[in-house]
Amino acid sequence: MSIDNRKKVRKVLVITLVFNIIVLILKLVVGIITGSLSLQADALHSVTDSANNVLGLVTNQLSSPYPDREHPYGHQKFEALGALGIAAFLGIACFEILSHAFERIFNDITPIKVTVNELWILLIVLGINICVTFYERKVGQKLKSPLLIADATHTMSDVWITIAVLFGLIGIWQSEVWQIPQLQYLDLLLAFPVAFLVLKSGWQVLKTNLPWLVDEIAIAPELIHQIVMEVPEVVNCHDIASRGLLGRQVFIEMHLIVENTDIKSAHDVTEEIEQRLTDKFAPVRILIHLEPPEYRAENIFFEG
């Protein structure tokens, strides 16, 4: 049976949306006050956090695990599509960081004035981002929600960006005290490793969700075969196929030959198989095609 955690996921998305808007406003205000273009760009990146939450709320509403006439396999891929949307936002954020960095390389740097008060505000912002990230990731792992985990990954990229900008602003703050004007370049130098972190986060999101969307194998056919062959009266099991996402919803198909010749006894064997596979991989939907002995085959995996 499918698990519907949409209400819990929606609650987390609403909470994180509120905090992301607070973070966005604080970054934008401090960026305008100090004249820091890197902080303003960081605030622009934070816009994607809020946009991701809104996107998540929309896809969460659509991703019901329960089938209907138009979607007999459920609607859960909408959630994976939402996660891919987050990966796209990560790519946009990376482009923003790099374009901003190159712009500063080829243009004169406008001196930035930073005070202790602005640095304290950024520390508060950083603390909020870290708390939101760990909260969302923890709940996402508990609910097995790829959308929450992907969104937490994106928020973590925002954490690293804020840390880089913060170090750059601290250097700028001290540049006048130490009389080292070259420290104005600190946030520029830190922009490139931050961009790499954003790309890495985007790749992780893609790697997690693409297999689900392209129906990549969910469970090794050898493992399914081993469980099935342990059931008494099973003679042969072949053409095994699986798709879906473990912990969310898995679909398994197979061809089966049993010793019993009457329908009732054969049905009892398939019921035992379904129960064992459900105990191991739930939630799961299983389709078993019974065949006569002459259809015996040694190919475990489905070949078409």
Image (cartoon, rainbow, N blue to C red):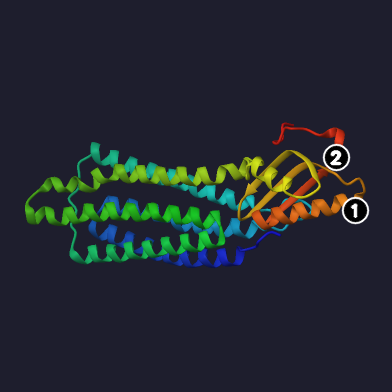
Question: Residue most toward the right?
Answer: 262
Q: Residues within 10 Å of mark 2 (few under 14, many from 20)?
A: some
Residue beneath disc 1:
264
Q: Amino acid at mark 2?
A: Glu
Find residue 266 and report its horizontal and vertical position in percent.
Answer: 86, 49
Residue type for callout 1? Lys
Please rate how many residues cluster around mark 1, counting C-alpha atoms within 10 Å: few if below 14, some from 14 to 19, many from 20. Answer: few
Q: What kind of element bears circle 1?
A: helix
Left or right placement of residue 289 versus residue 225 in this view: right
Name the image quarter holding the N terminus: bottom right
All told, the count of numbered labels is: 2
Left of 250 or right of it: where is 120? left
Circle 2 sits in a helix, a strand or a loop, which is it? loop
For image coordinates 93% across by 48% down, the residue present is 262
x and y percent of residue 127 in the render?
33, 65
Q: Disc 2 to disc 1, how far (Cα)? A: 14 Å
Front-most of 142 and 54? 142
Between residue 130 and residue 251, name the one nearer to us.
Answer: 251
Residue 291 has which mark? 2
Nearest the viewer among 112 and 10 is 10
Say which residue appears at 16% left-offset and 57% top-offset: 173
